[in-house]
Structures are given as C-alpha cells and as structure tokens.
Amino acid sequence: MTASVRGGEGGPASSVAARRGGGRRVAVVVFPGSNCDRDAMAAVRGAGGEAVPVWHQSEDLAGCGAVILPGGFSYGDYLRAGAMAAHSPVMRAVRRLAVEGGAILGICNGFQVLLEVGLLPGAMLPNRSLRFICREVRIRVERADGLLLRHLAQGQVLRLPIAHKEGNWYAPGDVLERVESEGGVAFRYCSPAGEVRPEANPNGALANVAGLVNREGNVLGLMPHPERRVAGLHGGVDGLGLIRALVEVA
Amino acid sequence: MTAWDSPATLAIAREHGLTPAEWERILTALGRVPNLTEVGIFAALWSEHCSYKSSKLHLRRFPTRGPRVVQGPGENAGIVSLGDGWVAVFKMESHNHPSFIEPYQGAATGVGGILRDVFTMGARPIMSLNSLRFGELEAPRMRHLVDGVVRGIGDYGNCVGVPTVGGEVDFHRAFNGNILVNAMCVGVAREEKIFYGRASGPGNRVVYLGSKTGRDGIHGATMASDVFDEGATARRPTVQVGDPFTEKLLMECCLELMDGGLLVGIQDMGAAGLTSSAFEMAARAGCGLELDLSRVPVRAEGMTPYELMLSESQERMLMVVEPRLLPRALAVCARWGLDGVEIGRVIREPEVRATFAGRLAFCLPVKPLVDEAPVYDRAWVPPAPAPPVTLPHLIGRDWSADLRRLLSRPQMGCSRFIWEQYDQSVGAATVAGPGEDAALVLIPGTRIGVAATTDCNSLACGLDPRRGAAQAVAEAVRNLACVGAEPVGLTDCLNFGSPENPEVMGQLVAAIDGMAAACRAFDVPVVSGNVSLYNETSGQAILPTPTVGMVGLVPEVRHAPRACFAESDAVYILGPLEGELGASRFLQLVMDMQVGPVPDVDDAGERTAAGVVRDLVRLGLVAARDLSDGGLAVAAAEMTAGGVGAVLELPAEASEARALFGEWGPRYLLAVSPAWEDSLVRAADGLVLTRLGIAVGERLLIRRSGETLIDESVSEIAALREVGLGWLA
Amino acid sequence: MGQVEVRVKLKEDVLDPQGEAIRRVLAGLGYGEITRVRVGKLLLLEVDGVEKPAVRARLEQAAQEVLSNPVIEDFEVRLP
Amino acid sequence: MGQVEVRVKLKEDVLDPQGEAIRRVLAGLGYGEITRVRVGKLLLLEVDGVEKPAVRARLEQAAQEVLSNPVIEDFEVRLP
Ligand SMILES: Nc1ncnc2c1ncn2[C@@H]1O[C@H](COP(=O)(O)OP(=O)(O)O)[C@@H](O)[C@H]1O
Ligand SMILES: [Mg+2]
C-alpha cells in the first residue's frame, strides 16, 4: 500500500519558498495522542521560529514550509506505533510538502509515522527488551548535509534521551543495503566515544539505526528527542542544531 | 418488579458491607425502606474508601491551613499557591487491592485516577510519582506483580504524556500478600483558572463525558447477584481496564472546556463512579441532581440502574454546563472524539433522583449520604514501645563487605530498572528526575521549579508509628532541600491494616499524630490525601505505611541540582557525624535485625540544616544528598554514580558503624568545588560541618585514623547497585 | 512436530480500548460497516509430539498459566 | 452482520522478540516441547453486510492498508 508514496521524488524547494509568507513558521502536527507537541512547539519558538499547531484533520499545513511530526502515542499506538496516524488527512499535506522539498522532521512517534506512510524505509518492531525505555543515549551523526543536518558535523556524538517502546528499526536485507548505499542513515546509536557497538544499541535496531534521512535530505526521522535538549536546564543542548536547521528552512 | 428496585433488607445491606446500625441509620434518614439500588449507593458512599469513617476523626488533627493554601482536603486534590499567580494541584492515592488482583491494570488505572483528580481541577499534570511496596521477590507471584505494576504505571503515564519522575520502592515480607501501589500526581494551573467539583445553578445541565459504562469493578455486585437472580441475568463484574489514549483525549478536552469557561463544575467518576461524582458534586453546591440513567452511554447490554450507578469504568467525567453553553461544550468534546451526553440537570432540592426507562429508579437526599456519613471512634490501643535491644558489638567488621551487601539488595540498589520504563522527560521540563533525592520540574514556559518527593520508611513505622511517620515528613523535607526546594504542601496516603483491630487502629492514630506534629514543626500544610485500610491477608496486617508526598518550590531555577561527585570537589558532612542504627538498613539487611528505637525528629535542627542546604543548592554551589537509607556509606556510594570516586577520612573519635551506616537526623553529604568551600563554611556557620576529604579518582575510599574501612571501585559500586533489581532487565 | 494455534481473547465484557480505537479510525476512513473490533493475540507454537495426549494436556495448561491472563482473558487451543 | 477474523502475523524472516521471550519462559517452566513461538494479532471484526462482495473487497483493503504493515507483516482475512 505504501509503496506508491515511498521516496518523495524531489520537487523544487522554490515552490515552498514561494508559498511561505516570510515568517519562520513551523507546523507541528497534533494527532490525537501526540504528547510531545507542546515540547516541539516550545523548542521551535526557542530557536526563533513561530510554531503553528496543525490538527490531524487539517488538509493543509497552514502554509508552513517545515513540519514536525512530534512524539507521543498517536491513537494510543494501539495497533502499531504510528499506524493509524499515517491515515490522518494531514498526512496528505505532509506528503505533498515532502515532494515539494519542504522540511519534515519526525521525532519518535513522528518517525514511526514517517515509516508507516513510506516516506522513510523500513518499520519499527518492539524494543528487544519488550519494555519501554527512557534513558539518555549517544548517537553518532552519519550525515551532516542537506536541509536538516547541516548544523551538525559528521562523526559528532550527540547526547539525547530516548523514550519509546517500539524503536527497533527493521528493514528487509535488500532495503537495508539500499539505505546504507544511499547514505540513508542519519544517526546511529554509539558509545560515548562514538563507536557503533552492539552494547550501545538500546533497542535492537538494525545497524544501530537511530535516525534516517531520505535521498533529498528533506525528510528526517529519529527516535531520540532533540526537543528535550534545547536548554541548559535540560541537561544539554544537543538537540538545538536540528531544530535550528528546521526553523531556518521554514 | 425488577430486582434493582425491589425493597432491600438488612441481609442485603450486610452483604454490601453495611452494619445493622448503619442499616437502622438509613431507615431513619429516609423514613422508609430503601430499594436495592439505594442500598448500593449508601454502601458505596459510606464505605471506608469514600467516607473515611474510621479515620476522619483523627485526620482532623492535620494542620490544613497556611498562607499558601488555596484548597485543603475535601476537593479532588489539594491546592497551594506557588507565587506569580501559579498554583500546584496535587494528591496521592492508593490502588493496592486492584493491583494485587491484576497488577498491570490495577496500577495503570491507579495512575489514571490520580491524573483525573488533578486535571479535573483545571490543572495540567506536570509529573507523576509512585510509592511501591512489594513482598519478598521469592514470594508467590511477586515477580509477576512487580513486573505488572511497573509496566502498568509506565504504559499509562507514558501514553498520556505525563513524566514519571520519582517515587520509592521497598520489599518486605509483610507485603507478600498485600502489595502497596500509591500514585501521586502534581499539576499546575493559574489560580484564577481553578475548577471545583460543584454542581451549582439549578437548571444547569449534567453532562457525561468519556468512555462508555460497563460492568467494571462493581463491588457489591457479586454478593448482591443472588438477589438479582429472580430472572434477571446476574453477571460477574469485570476488572477495570485502563485506556490511556482516551484519558489523554479526556484531559485535553477537559482542560480546553475549562479554559474556555464552558463549565460550571466537573468531577471524575472515580471510586463508586457515577454515585460519588453525582452526590459529592451536589453536596458541595448544596443542590441536587435529576438524572435520566437511560441516557448513560453503555458498553454492555442490559445494565441496570444499580450497575450504572456503581460501575467503576475508567476515563469518565461528570460535568455541569449552563444550557446556553451546552452546544459549544459538546462541540469541543466532539472535536476530541469524545461523546458528551446530557444525562440530567441540576435541581434546587438537595437530593439526587434518577429515572430509568421512564420509572423512578431512586430518590435520595444528599446530606445523609455525604455530609452525615457515619464517623467512628474506633477502639485503639497505643502501639507498644519498641522493646529495648542490645545492639551487637560492631567493631572491626569488614565494612566493605557490608556495603557491598547493602548495595546489592533490591531495597537499596538503584531502581533504574524501574524508572527506565517511565518516560521521565516528556514535557521537556524535568530538571531533576529519578535517581535524585527529589524530582524538580519546571512550570511550562517559566523558571519556577516544582519539586516533589514521596517518602516513608515502613520498617520504622512498624517499630514506632508515631516517630516513623514524623520521620517520613522530615525525610521529605531533606529530600526537597537537596534539590533546592522549600516545602509548600503535603499529601499523604495512609496504608494500614484493618481499623477494626485496635492495634492497627492504634498505629493509624499514632502515625497521624506523628505526621501532624511534624507538619506543624515544618509549617507544611496537609492539603489532600487518601486512606487505604484493610491491607492484610489472613489477619496479618502490612507494615503501617503512611506515605508522605511532599511538594516543594524553587521560585527561580538557575542551576540543575547535581547529585554526584565532580573531580576535586571537597566533601563535607553537614550535621552530626554519627547517625542512629535503630531501624536502619544496616541492621535490617546486614545484621538481619528489624529492631531499635526510631529517634524523634529534631525539628529545629532539621529546619536549619534544610534551609542551609536549600540555599546552597539553589546557588549551584553544592551537590547534596541526605543521609537516609544506608547512611553515609551508601550516600557516598550513590554520589559516585557520575564516575568520580572519593577519598574520605572519618575523624578518629567517630564510631565506625554509626558514622558509616547510621541514619536519621539532619545529616547531609555535600560536595563542593574548592572555589566555593569558603561560602559553604560561612553558610554553615553555627552548624556542625566536617570536612571528610575530596572527590577524586575511580575508587570510593573511606578511612579512619589511617585504617581503611571501605575501599570499592566506582565501577564495582555501579555494578552492585544493578544487582538487586537486575532480574527485571 | 506440529503447529498449534493458541487464540487469546479478552473476555466479552472487558473493555478493549485497542479495538475501540481501531474501530474509530476505520470508521473515520469510511469503513462504517465495521461496527465492532476486538483485539486478541494469536500465538503460533511449534510443538514436538503434539499428537500425544499428554503433550496436548500440557498445552492447555501452558495456555492457561502462561499464555493468557485468566483475570481478563479467555483462550482456546487449536491443535493441528 | 457477521464476524470476520483478520489474522496479522510477522513475516517469517522477521525476528519476533516477544515470541522468543515467551518460548524461553515456557522452556524455563519445563515446556521444552514448544520449540518456537510466534506472536500475531487476532482482530475480530463485526461487519454489516459481510455477505456482499463489495464489503468483502473493502475488508481486504482495510486489512492491507490499515491493519497490517506490509514491510513486516502478512495478513489473512477469514470470512464467516
Ligand atoms: N517506584 C519508583 N518510581 C519512580 N522513581 C523511583 C521509584 N523508586 C525509586 N525511584 C527513584 O529512585 C531514587 C532513589 O529512591 P530512594 O532510595 O527511595 O530515594 P530517597 O532515599 O532519596 O528517598 C529516587 O530518585 C526516586 O525518585
Ligand atoms: Mg533521600
């Protein structure tokens, strides 16, 4: 079902620029059960952007050129994480934005939604431990180019919290190969020194994948929560780079 | 005639847990014989859980007033002012029995209930905590219970998106047959946006919101089913299942309704469901309600008024709305995908009357049920003083081995395996979470910090309920100080055995006395709470566990409190060098002795020391840990969690056991960067402050007069602390 | 060796939040004809000696004690 | 109205940690004869007009597009 929309065949970014009204407006989608939407909006505002909540039933993104699909438990994650949100009307607008080259950031549940709609490859399985895991992890930046990753440095190690029960990324062998060869892995779980090792993998994700980016670089999904690390009192600001990049392209 | 409106008898009343005297009282109050549904309603509202009939008399001794108190006990949750127009709304509640029957759903619905108690007052929940008591891990079903409870708490809170940031857990054989699950929630609101559970304004509409009603947790129903049998199909009640997704929608919907000024009053349907919400809302407003029970949305077929009134289906609210605002209110509900259904209206007469299928189902006056519920002065005997004991001669032991033993016990180890299953940072406002002495969470969009901690040493309360309860308050004050917070209010959950046992009643009375006295001493008002009685199996009561949930304030958070050593810190102990060994973890877990006197709280000393620590932490000058469970040795071990060890030298005159493992009293371990040592010394002027050494390297070394008492590597400590609950991983 | 299917369902009267949420989404997508959804578990076991009565009895026991939660669930063992 | 059963199973080559965990627990309890466990979902739907071919086709579609994820799962719709 989702094959037809996989990819995002790279439309000109200019159409996005044309649509936006000058302000750095970032849409934050609110699904029933989203619970990191406020955090995402606060992070956007902190980075100098205007955060625009967009209800899941909306057919458009209020003219925003960038969107965050926030974390949470859309529809309770009662079927599969992100599965039901993938069918919300707003996701049609998100797909359009992807094709037009707008910036899309899926965090945690938002990442799961991006997989469910096929904007990013693979699927999420329950964590290897079968338990919800909330802890700080390190992720290594594998790509530092494109719309969303450009404020990061390749090989840089970020300290961010994870909080999920289904973050065990999986893809069939051929898909994994393609993802790897195309440089689709944006982040991998790693040790404090930046080594990608099995012990550093909190949930069993294939190839320690913590985040993926599409070929065009405008659709990014990750399990850790950058919006929870954007102020000194959060215990770090390692999430700021991503949020800033998003605000700048909005 | 159908069963639900057939006249009741004394026998039926007794099956519902009412006494013959209570039955007489009902007959007098009504001047007629109630029907079955009415007896069910009386039994529910006069139950221990709803009426506090055994404890009420004693609860009156709690100090409940203070300059910050906006709402004391009696509402769905207590409210204290935090300044700047903000208030904290909080409460703690038990879900012990349901969790023992079905741990996952029992714990989950416990969390759901306490969240509703808070958001029903117009507050957005910003954190959850929980206090857990399990039996020995080897006891039947115990691992299953631990696993289920932790998953239940996690799955529910995580899904709703309220961070679970603290709590406590203990294991003792006294809980083998009766575990404790106490959940606490703290919310915040603007003071002018507070809502109350009042059904005022005759003519206003009564609206049912949320999940449909099923035969969930209808208490009296199993016993009463015999009565139902005249043709009607009696069905067994079912276990309540939590639906955190609906709860999340309900929360957002209610907050939007309240923010938009669309409600007159609102209350969740908690224990005793529609019964308690209807009668309590009417009682608070001095009005009455008229309900059409046929309109209650149902999930199961053939539900009777009896069942509709007593169902404890979760995620349901009762609201009162002005008629002119009703369409707008219902539109908000619809937008959140929730069914809002008008089921009645407010009436002037102080009674609740309900029709069902066009017939009168019941008509009961509000006052006798709520305000005039029975209050008992149950017989009690003062707890016997803990027998004097001669402590063993404690010198020259292998103290390192003792520390290792302590750290590897489930009671003492790191509870990481529990709290890693909780989302601690959703909300992006958690400054201090599990693993620190207290939690500290910012009010969204501000730098105002709200701190919270739960505390109770069940063992100490078993030995000396009065002092044990007082110490729980003191411990909470110390824990708050360690994150820089001053106490502003307290909620409690009093978990005891049967009040019909004079000894248990004596424990309850003593614990309330101790807690009340300590609250006065620390100027902390009690604004909400919960009593859970009959916690026993085969006549064996649990250890008395009066859990304290204390909320603190940091007016402006500038620094995240730290709880670990940093390289080259100077390490001090503030307060007496030696603690007391009575009721200590050392005696319990190393010497296998559950004995000893529990000391009185040193009110003045605690207040002064807490004030000093609080100020230093606020300024970001020290890392602080109070010396409670396991004393100095364990606190120092915990402070190595950041990877840095310490070399500490105890003064020659210190008794080894009491300095290393003594507990109680205003004692803190402080780590301060050398640059701030002078400030620390000045701040502690007039208090006992002893420099013990420095934080350095990767070992924890504690010496006295050149002799090494403890020598452990930091990594070994970390590994040991994972042992106790490691099986959960 | 044979494949055994253990079907675990919530008891009829027990609330099924999952099923209800799924039903709502389906209704929103236009599948109004689906009027009720209940979610259960399907456990597919590979079992040695499944033809032996003793093994079959043990499977019943495993389903009751491990695979289902008798407080809220019913189960059914389907042998090959 | 009829009861429709939608069976959703993980694809054969996808790791099933839950199934494996259950197998281990069973083995620990002495049920060594259970050599493999796979966990799937059993969705029980009540459907109006299930006898109509159009409705049946729509059920297939719902199962494929909503109830299962083709990357990791297979599904089967069992009509009454
Ligand atoms: N059941 C629980 N839920 C959440 N956090 C817990 C739980 N049990 C313990 N914790 C956390 O673990 C830490 C250590 O607990 P404890 O030893 O009871 O602390 P303290 O002695 O300072 O009160 C605390 O930060 C506490 O919040
Ligand atoms: Mg403490």
Image (cartoon, coloured by chain):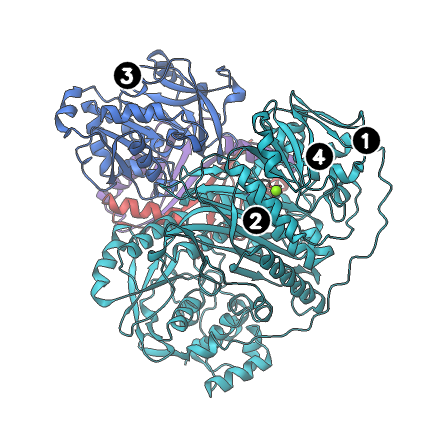
Chain colours: A blue, B cyan, C red, D purple
Real-space Cα separation, disc 3 to disc 2, in angstroms: 48 Å
Q: Are marks 2 and 1 in contact (CB under 8 Å)?
A: no
Q: Is mark 2 within 8 Å of ligand 1?
A: yes
The quarter in which the N terminus of chain B is drawn is bottom left
Which residue was labeled with disc 4?
B633
- Residue type of the residue flagged with mark 2: Thr
Real-space Cα separation, disc 4 to disc 2, in angstroms: 22 Å
* Camera-side residue of B611 and B715: B611
The quarter in which the C terminus of chain B is drawn is top right
In the image, taking residue A42 as reference, residue A195 lies left or right, namely right
Q: Upstream in the sequence, badge 2 or badge 1?
A: 1
The location of residue B274, given as percent across then percent down, is 41, 66
The location of residue B313, given as percent across then percent down, is 43, 59
Where residue B325 sits, quadrant-wise, is bottom left
Mark 1 residue crowding within 10 angstroms, few (<14) / some (14–19) / many (20+): few
Q: Mark 1 vs mark 3: same chain?
A: no
Which residue was labeled with disc 3?
A146
Mark 2: secondary structure: strand
State whether residue B478 is above or below residue A124.
Answer: below
